[in-house]
Amino acid sequence: VMMYACTAWWTNCSSSNRRKLEVIQNKALRSISRQPWFVSNKTIRNSLGVPSLGEFARNISKTFYKKAMVSDSALIRDLTLPPSGLDYRKHPIVILTDPP
């Protein structure tokens, strides 16, 4: 449920809110897998095959932009152009350059 449309809202979240969301994801995965406290979150995610929210958002964005670049539609190809102006950080393509 948390991953639904995360590419739309992930770029607009502050880094502290992103961290809080990842903590919630980690707690849910730990509870689902019934792992003790000393097992790392990365180990739990890898064993369940679930990426972190940041990794998921970047992977979905990469797939979208790769497909958009080779689209027959000029309007869709234009979505891959880097945005200009002050609202650059709110553009979904910025997720590919954001640190994890």
Image (cartoon, helix red, strand yellow):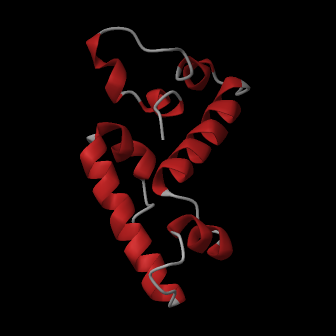
Q: Is residue 81 visible?
A: yes
Image position of 49 with respect to 94: above or below? below
- Expressed as whole percent of the image width and height from the top left, the position of residue 47 reads 67, 75
Q: Nearer the viewer, residue 77 or 50?
A: 50
- Expressed as whole percent of the image width and height from the top left, the position of residue 44 reads 58, 74
The residue lying at 48 percent from left, 41 percent from top is 100
Total of numbered circles in the picture? 0
Image position of 44 with respect to 8: above or below? below
Q: Is residue 1 left or right of residue 57?
A: left
Residue lying furthest top in this view? 85
The residue lying at 50 percent from left, 91 percent from top is 34
Image position of 88 with respect to 25: above or below? above
Q: Nearer the viewer, residue 9 or 74?
A: 9
The residue lying at 47 percent from left, 34 percent from top is 99
Q: Quadrant of residue 45?
A: bottom right
- Expressed as whole percent of the image width and height from the top left, the position of residue 67 reads 69, 34
Q: Nearer the viewer, residue 96 or 73?
A: 96
Q: Is residue 84 left or right of residue 70?
A: left
